[in-house]
Image (cartoon, grey):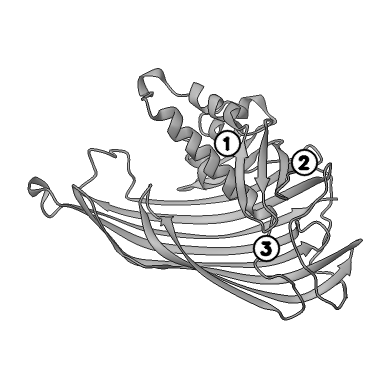
Amino acid sequence: MKSYFVFFTAILFTSSVVSAQPLIDPSVKGKEIGGSYRLRVQPKKGDMFHYKTTSKTIISVKNDDDLLTELMPNLKPNEKSSYLITHYLTNVVRMIRPDSAIDMFVTIDSTHIVQDVDGIQHTFTSTLPENYHDPLFFGSAAYTGIQFGWMVDQFGNSKDIYGYYPIVDRLFEDIEDSLVTTDTRNNISQEVYSTLERLLYREVPGFSMDFLAKDSTDESKFDENRATWSTMEFPMQKEIKNKVQRLEEGAGKKYAVTEAEITYTPKERVIEEKEYHSTLPKYSFLNKQSEYIDIESGMILYNKIQEEESYAVKIESTLPEKAGKNFVTVYHRKGETIVEMMK
C-alpha cells in the first residue's frame, strides 16, 4: 500500500488567493473596549471565510524491537522528521439549521509541503502535475479541490462532516488491488473523516461560558481516549483552562483575546489484550493557544497554537513462545501552528 503518512502527520493547503493578507496583526494592539459579550459561533448564511494555516513540526521516534519484526519489517530504529506546512482553505456558510447549527461548504484549494525525513528533503505542491501524482505526496494532494460539508454547533463542537467520499475514492483507487481487503475502504473513510476534523477544529473556538468579559475564566475536565502509538488508545483526563485577556476593536472588528491551555493526564497506563500487555510508562501533553475571536461571527480571526507531546510505549507478548520479547517506542513531537483569517 502506498504511504499516506505524510498527510496524516501534517497537511498543507494553499488558496487560489495567495496574495491575500491576514485580517489581524497580533503585533498591533487594538483599542480596548469594555462590557461583556455572549460569544457563540453564529455566522450568517452566505458568509465566506478564507483561512491560512502555517505549521512547523519536529518529530523524533526511537524504536527498540524484537517482538513486532515480522509484522513491521520496515520499522526504523530511529527517525527524525520536520515539516513546514501552510494551508489555505475556504468556507462558505450554506445554511443555518433549525437547531442553530452552522452548515458550511469547505474547499481545500491546493496543498504544499516541505518535509525533511532523516536528512532527505522533499518539496511538494499540488499545483504542479508532476508533484500531484508523486507516491510520497498523493495522500495529501488527494484532498484538494473537492467541496465537502461541515456542521458545527454554536458552542464550537463539530457535529458532522459529509460529502467527503470523493476523497475516499481517490485514495482507494490508488491502492494496489493485491493489498485491498474488505476493511480497506472503511479504514480510509474513517481516517479521512478524522483528518478533516482535526484540521477544521482550529477555525472555531470552544465556548462554555455564557458571557465573556476581561479577566473572566473557565475550566473544564472530561475523560477521553487518546491515541498514542499506531491505533493504541489509553484513557485520559483532558483539562481545558481559558482566560479572556482583553476585549479589543481593530481592523473593522470587535474581538476577544483569550489564552487557553489544554493538558492530557493518563488515567490508566496498562492495556491487557489477548496476546499483548501494553504499558505507558511516560506521557506528557501541553497545548497553549492565543486566540482572537470575532465577537460578531464567533469565528477565529487569529490563533497561535504551541503544542508538545512526549511518550514511551512498551508492548510485551503474553504468549509462552515469545516470552521476554517486547517492543518499545519513544516519541517526541513539538510544533507551532498559526491560524489566520484572510482579508
Name the quadrant containing residue 204: bottom right
Asked whether 131 or 31 is in front, the reply is 31
Dot 2 lies on which element?
strand
Amino acid on which disc 3 is placed? Lys
Between 160 and 256, the residue placed more toward the observer is 160
Q: Percent from the top left, x then y, of residue 337?
A: 64, 57
Between the residue at mark 3 and the residue at mark 1, the CA separation in whole angstroms equals: 23 Å
Helix, strand or loop at mark 3: strand
Q: Is residue 22 left or right of residue 336?
A: right
| The N terminus sits in image quarter | top left
In this view of the protein, which residue sits in the foreground, 268 or 139? 268
Residue type, mark 1 in image: Ser
Whichever of callouts 2 and 1 sits on the residue coming sooner in the sequence is 2
Of the image marks 2 and 3, the number of the one nearer the N terminus: 2
From this viewpoint, is residue 163 visible? yes
In the current view of this chain or complex, which residue is farthest to the front?
A: 98
| Numbered badge on residue 95 | 2
Q: Residue pushed farthest bottom?
A: 215
Residue at 55 percent across and 34 percent down: it is: 137
Give the residue displayed 63% in from the left and 52% down from the top.
Answer: 201
Q: Which mark is residue 334?
A: none
Q: Which residue is mark 1?
A: 140
- Callout in the foreground (2, 3): 2
Residue 121 shows in this picture: no
3D distance between C-alphas at marks 2 and 1: 29 Å
Q: x, y percentage for residue 302?
A: 75, 60
Residue located beneath label 3 in the image:
304
